[in-house]
Image (cartoon, rainbow, N blue to C red):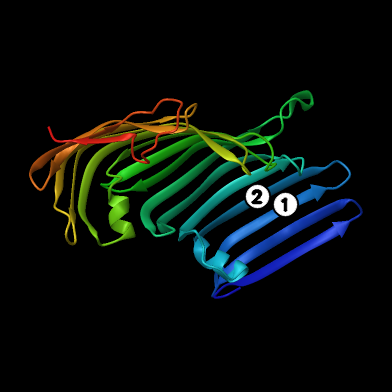
Amino acid sequence: LGAYDLYTYFTIDRNIVNLQRFLLNQDDATLLYVQGMYNITQDSLNMSINGAGFDIGDIYAAAAEEQPIVSGKTFVDVHVEGALAGPNVNGIFAVKNGMVAKFPFDEMVLKLGDSTANTEGMTPPRLRIDQFRLTRFDEYEILASGEFPFSARDSLSLDIDGKGNFLRLLGDLSDFFQNPTSECRITGRIRGTPLEPRLQAAHLSLRGASMEFKSVVPKISDVNGDLTLDVARRFIHLDSLDGLMGGEKFHIYNQPVSDVVADAPLQNMRINDS
């Protein structure tokens, strides 16, 4: 598998599949070790997954022959136990000095707790995310927690909370955005299903933001504002956005129009000098 060697040894004895070892090696080092057992009759799985030092992006690219979304040096210590369709999963999955698409990060940590039980068939089993944390040192941090279903059609529940200089993401996308600084806070709730996730609530506050541009557009500074998602109206409410552009004050806000569709496509937006 690319620069890695895979070794596996398993036995099947009547109704028991025994995975004695699954190894991911590089040179003389074992980077990933998996062992476990599955009782087919009892639908009982018991498996441990341990590893460190491999790049999750390299493994994905070699196996799927396409570019990975996440890459970086990976650590995993996870235990899986229970029914195959909805086992209890707990442990930790971490990536350091990695990338999510085009965005670099220093640490990504996923802490998993025991899955919620399927009590009397009333609750589909879900993976409990005790904490997801993505950190870019001296820039920003994003936290999330909640429950993720094993079935793509069952309901999910994720709460998001982040703070820091999120304007830095614009600089990662293009060098047109230069020296972005800000103090942001973002909160949100995601519901729905994995197939059809819905952003149920979201709020972004922006404080003390400034940014230069590669050409044409003058520098912005001392920018403050708040954006809130109005789910019922399917409307992003910009309470206000105030600051300086090229040393001149600006003030931007919007408001929902009446139930009658506006003739002018930008009727919701107001830009005033102040």
Q: CA distance from mark 1 to mark 2?
A: 6 Å
Residue located beneath label 2 in the image: 48
> x, y percentage for residue 63?
62, 68
Q: Position of residue 231 (x, y in %)?
A: 48, 29
Q: Position of residue 123 (x, y in %)?
A: 71, 27
Most foreground residue, 228 or 193: 228
At x 70%, y 61%, the residue is 21
Kindly identify which numbered label has been placed on residue 36: 1
Q: Residues within 10 Å of mark 1 (few under 14, many from 20)?
A: some
Q: Quadrant of residue 161?
A: top left
Q: Name the quadrant containing residue 274.
A: top left
Work out which residue is located at the far left of the displayed protein and give it.
247
Check whether the beta carbons of the residues at disc 1 and disc 2 lie within 8 A of each other: yes
The three-letter amino acid code for the residue at tag 1 is Gly
Q: Count of labels shown?
A: 2
Where disc 2 sits, the SS reads: strand
The one nearer the camera, 10 or 261, is 261
Residue at image coords 55%, 57%: 51
104 relative position to 253: left or right: right
Q: Is residue 30 visible?
A: no
Q: Where 270 falls versus 109 (above or below)?
A: above
